[in-house]
Image (cartoon, grey):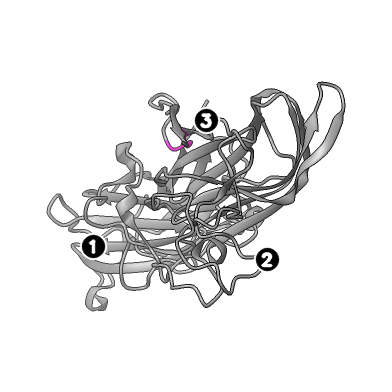
Amino acid sequence: MKKSFIFIALATATFVSCVNDETTAINQGNSIDFRTNMDGVTRAAAKTSFATNDVIDVFATFGGTKSFKEDFTKSDNGNFSSVNKHYWPSDISNTKQMVFTAFYGVAQSDETAGSLASAFTPSATAASQTDLLFAKHTSSARETPVLLNFRHMLSQINVKVKNSNSNISVDITGVRIGYIKTSGAFAYGAGDNTDTQNGSKIGQSAWTPTAFTAPAEGHTYANDYKYDQTVTTKTLNGLVSDAAALEGFSPWMLIPQNMTGSSTQYQNTKDGGTATDAPDLGGAYIALEMEIYNWNSTTRGDKIVAKQWCYWPITTNWDPGYVYNYTINVGGGGYMPTDKNNDKNLDPILDTPIEFSVNCTIDAWSDYDSDNNTDGNQPIDVGN
């Protein structure tokens, strides 16, 4: 069952306002601390629990003016506390509110609440990518406790494989995703500016992906903007109709974005390219490093495709807080990085490719309370 990230701030005393350094409330001796009520999350790359010394970055405004920005660290007793203590203002009301924004896994701007300090770039290594979390809550009265319900900021991308062709045997040794924007700025503003307690996920408009930079001579967007993984050799002998996991594969945690429509044509001149350059498909793709043999139901025959990267265009858009599960059918629909006919059309992997290529199901990530959560399962077929 999908669960939610719930952070509870115990606020049993008053804040000290930072405006003009005036004390607007009496310190009753108890400062704000945070504690967590985090249920398990099933996705491998997601944050599943907080450890001692984990830090959340909290920005508070009061009446539209910055009150404080402080790191809160989890201590041995399970609470998150700050070095500098803060208290509720005495004149908090429906018209003069305290607004909290908080991040886990990334630095918040010092001056703009709900914004990243700088553009974020996921690690080039999938296993090292982090689950970024964001929360916002507005208080019009002193709340005990203050609830911060964190939401996932990134999109998670998972890849599995199948084979609809009973006459081939395939070895898969690598996975790539490319022609995607690899960094972006986050600002929880217009169109997204509601408390994360309210049940909705973060909107894609909160992210502004960094624009592509034109590739250098001999390069392509598809090759410059990509993530690669090596996996334990996966062999599909003949018909494998169920989606099979790739051993050693780590789901990617990437910048939410609108995907550029793919094509099967070279968009730039091929002259000057190298053997390692990927063809410019004109849009996003998933590629598998693989080799293909004939299969006679029991044994392999001749090799018909030498080991190389083969490409499947994708066109789905990615929203924050969703898992995108792509199943690649190696029995058809993909393309090799060659153009034997010199017509700027990529060559199909097989002479008579099966029309079905990529199936993508979109799962709701574990953002909702268990009593309110509904799982998305919307199949999207992309192909010829």
Q: Is residue 311 magenta?
A: no
How far is mark 1 from mark 3, CA to CA?
55 Å
- Marks 1/3 in contact by CB < 8 Å: the verdict is no
Depth check: give the residue in front, 131 or 20: 131
Q: Residue at x 54, y 67 (%)?
A: 270
Disc 2 marks a residue whose amino acid type is: Ala
Disc 1 marks a residue whose amino acid type is: Phe
Q: Would residue 198 be seen by someone viewing this image from the given angle?
A: yes
Image depth: mark 1 or mark 3 in front: 3
Depth check: give the residue in front, 305 or 22: 305
Instruction: Give the tally of numbered discs.
Output: 3
Residue 96 in picture, x, y percent from top left: 16, 57
Image depth: mark 2 or mark 1 in front: 2
Query: What residue is shown with label 1?
Result: 62
Query: What residue is shown with label 3?
Result: 356
Give left or right: position of 377 versus 164: left
Q: Residue furthest left?
A: 95
Task: Give the secondary structure at mark 1.
Answer: strand
Residue 259 in picture, x, y percent from top left: 40, 51
Residue 72 in picture, x, y percent from top left: 49, 60
Q: Which residues are magenta?
A: 362-367
Q: Residue furthest right?
A: 299
Give left or right: position of 219 versus 64: right
Which tag, 1 or 3, sits closer to the chain's start?
Answer: 1
Quarter residue 271 falls in:
bottom right
Task: Give the secondary structure at mark 3.
Answer: loop
Task: Give the secondary structure at mark 2.
Answer: loop
How far is mark 3 from mark 2, CA to CA?
28 Å
Query: What residue is shown with label 2?
Result: 275
Q: Relative to 280, does residue 238 appear above or below in the rendering?
A: above
Which tag, 3 or 2, sits closer to the chain's start?
Answer: 2
